[in-house]
Image: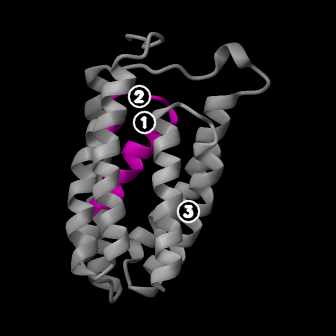
Amino acid sequence: MSGLELIAAVLGVTAVWLTVKQNAWCWPIGLVMVLIYGWLFYAVKLYSGMLLQLAYAILQLYGWWQWKRPDHVEEARQVSRLQRPALFTGLAAGVLLSVALGSTMANWTDAALPWLDASLTGFSLVAQLWMAQKRLQCWLLWVVVDIFYVGQYLHQQLYFTAGFFAVLTVIAVRGWLEWRRDPALVLP
């Protein structure tokens, strides 16, 4: 499985790098990557991560639509900052998702690392939604989540994936810096 894992990691680095550059090709490349990872996570019993990949597939399509908006080019997303109420609402949603999914995985499945996997899934969904909406804060949340993912994947002996998430952490810092300097940055 390490060959498939390597392909997914390379696609992932490519997709996230294109996201930093605000290139809409990040979304279809990301779609292929999340489908591969969905299969891999099922195989190693990271069921929350597998479900996350399925949600990502939908969010990949949503992000592509948000960024391109071929029917309304003038309404295509611009980089913007979340206001505090929206920021706290998103983080609260991450906590609620984490608790609900963690409880489900811990009590009704043989999931490996059910609480950690569920928490990372909950906050990843929030970060991905913010990314699709081109919210600057997505990158800071990704930095935190990606650091924890490195540890989880090392524990599961998914070494290419752990390396991929280490690279994603660096790219997320770069994304934060680049999007902060974006001349189109919209302040709410």
The percent coordinates of residue 100 (x first, y second) are 31, 63
Q: Are marks 2 and 1 in contact (CB under 8 Å)?
A: yes
Does residue 90 appear anywhere in the picture?
no
- Is 120 inside the magenta-drawn segment? yes
Within-10-Å neighbours for mark 1: few <14, some 14–19, many 20+: many
Circle 3 or circle 1, nearest the eye:
3
Which residue does the image show at 65% across and 17% down from the upper left? 75
Which residue does the image show at 60% across and 46% down from the upper left? 27
The percent coordinates of residue 64 (x first, y second) are 64, 39
Does residue 168 appear anywhere in the picture?
yes
Pick whichever of labels 3 and 1 is earlier in the sequence: 3
The percent coordinates of residue 10 (x first, y second) are 49, 61
Query: Magenta stretch?
Result: 119-139
Badge 1 element: helix
Q: Main secondary structure of the magenta part?
A: helix
Q: Which residue is mark 1?
A: 130
Q: Which residue is mark 3?
A: 33
Within-10-Å neighbours for mark 3: few <14, some 14–19, many 20+: many
In the rendered structure, find residue 135 and report the number of the disc placed on it.
2
Q: Is residue 70 left or right of residue 150?
A: right
Which residue does the image show at 37% across and 78% down from the upper left? 46
Pick whichever of labels 2 and 1 is earlier in the sequence: 1
Residue 62 vs 11, above or below: the answer is above
Q: Is residue 120 left or right of residue 24?
A: left
Q: Is residue 98 left or right of residue 161?
A: left
Q: Quadrant of the C terminus?
A: top left
Please name the amino acid that badge 3 sits on: Met
